[in-house]
Amino acid sequence: MTEKLRIVPVTSLGHSELEPYRTLRGRTHHWSDGFCVAEGEKAVRALIASSLRVHSLLLSEDWLHALAGAFRFPQHSETILYIAPDNLLEEIVGYRMHKRLLAIGVIPANPSLADMQHNAPSASVFVALEGIADAENMGMILRNCAAFGVEGMIIGTDSCSPWLRRSVRVSLGNVFSLVIHRSDDVIGTVQYCQREWNWQLIATTPYGGSTDLSPSGDIRARCLLFGSEASGLSEKALRISDARFSIPMRNQVDSINVANAVAVALFAMQR
């Protein structure tokens, strides 16, 4: 099957098309240019299997043969596979990090709220994030949301991008299976969904919330709101919510990591 693929052998990182790979060591933000980076087998396979367009891969000869059967969808027709020797691949960011397998994907267009709502079944669960600063926390949240079947996410521009390289890596590529709406005003956006489609907004807070996440009334969808690592949800987010949820703490522990809180809350909602 490899004869149908666009294979380009490279012996130097000076190739102009390899610029995104050359700059992986630097503090560059490929996502701001509409690209995301996947590294390692799980993330790269997830990208290839997703509906996203795969711009290119940089990989070893061994990986070319291992992945050849995965390129079977129409969006792969323009994908370029740059084949490089091991020593060149190790120069980029280190063998231990990416295992000689990297890919560049094209970030999808921002889905509209109407499409996100229309495509979701009744009694759907959404997650909205306010002020998540750490890329690793973001990656773990993405993985948790995929694991618990979240229908869609609303992420404010006050949070780091879910398409950052570290977020993609920590998510193990699960970001590629999620529907993510990027909002300039996440609280205004969830209020719109609350008003327009009768979403129930549930604020997560360390104090004073219920431990019961059972649905009540004629609710089209429920949306869990999570706030920043440092201070949690804003007062505005707490004020506009229909309900509050708290995870009981022991031994005078104030709270748990926000990504862990997402997993606990989603599990509680499933129950």
Image: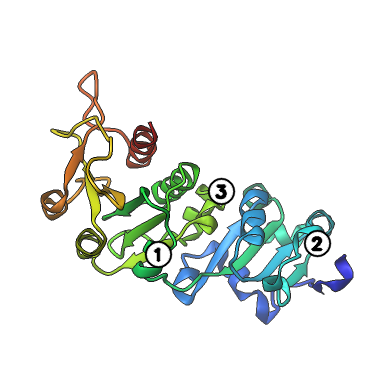
Which element is circle 3 on? loop
Q: Residues within 10 Å of mark 2 (few under 14, many from 20)?
A: some
Q: Residues within 10 Å of mark 3 (few under 14, many from 20)?
A: many
Is 10 in front, or is 244? 244
Query: Contact (CB < 8 A) between labels 3 and 2?
Result: no
Separation (CA) of disc 3 from disc 2: 25 Å
Identity, as a three-letter code, of the amino acid under mark 1: His
Q: Quadrant of residue 62?
A: bottom right
Give the position of the C terminus as an image quadrant: top left
Identity, as a three-letter code, of the amino acid under mark 2: Pro
Please give the residue where the numbered disc 1 appears in the rendered image.
118
Q: Residue at x 59, y 59 (%)?
A: 38
Of marks 3 and 2, the one in the foreground: 3
| Rendered location of residue 258, percent (x, y) | 32, 41
Give the position of the N terminus as an image quadrant: bottom right
Identity, as a three-letter code, of the amino acid under mark 3: Leu
Q: Residue at x 35, y 32 (%)?
A: 268
Please give the residue where the numbered disc 3 appears in the rendered image.
172
